Amino acid sequence: MRSSRSRVSPSSGLNRPRRSWRRSGWTARRRSRKSGECSIGPVRRFALLLAGFGLARLFFWGRRRPAPAPPVDPRAEELRARLAESKAVVDEREEFEAAETPVDEADPEERRRRVHERGREAVEEMRRPPAEG
């Protein structure tokens, strides 16, 4: 039976060879430093500048004054009167249409009889001799 362990490990893992910092001239203090320039100061100043603008905006935003009302147009009263008049006309029209018989409820035979009766009355009135008076 074969053993499940191989002689050569596929990965070094934690047993990998480490670079010796002492031999290359690096110390722990030097490793943590950045090379030549640090950008934390300018970024911090920029963040403070933005925060100042934001606070100023909040402060002055709450103190905003309302805009003055626009001048009243002299034609406005005339337009209001015309609007009220047109509303009255609409109401009158609705009353008039309410008195009419809807098409689906109308009886065409009844209407035809009334028209014929009026026509006969008109014919008879024309045939009568003129009244002297």
Image: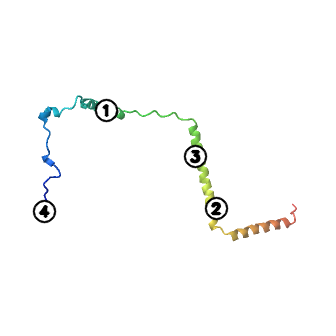
Q: Quadrant of residue 99?
A: bottom right
Instruction: Give the labeled residue for mark 4.
Output: 2
Q: Residues within 10 Å of mark 2 (few under 14, many from 20)?
A: few
Q: Quadrant of residue 120?
A: bottom right
Nearer the observer, disc 4 or disc 2? Answer: 4
User: Residue 98 lies in what quarter of the image?
Assistant: bottom right
Residue occupied by mark 1: 50
Residue at position x 60%, y 52% in the image: 90
Mark 1 and mark 4 lie on one chain; the one further toward the N terminus is 4
Q: Secondary structure at mark 2?
A: loop
Image coords of residue 85 (percent x, y)? 60, 46
Spatial distance from mark 3 to mark 1, Cα to Cα? 55 Å
Which sits in the foreground, 24 or 55?
Answer: 24
Q: Please indicate whether residue 41 sits to the left or right of residue 64 in the image.
A: left
Residue 84, numbered circle: 3
Q: Mark 4 to mark 2: distance in Å?
A: 107 Å
Q: CA separation, marks 1 and 4? A: 69 Å
Tag 2 or tag 1, which sits nearer the N-term?
A: 1
**Label drawn at residue 100:** 2
**Disc 4 and disc 2 in contact, CB within 8 angstroms:** no
In-front residue for pair 114/124: 114
* Three-letter amino acid code of the residue under disc 1: Leu
At numbered mark 3, what does the secondary structure look like: helix, strand or loop?
A: helix
Element under label 4? loop
Disc 1 from disc 2: Cα separation: 73 Å
Q: Residue at x 53, y 35 (%)?
A: 72
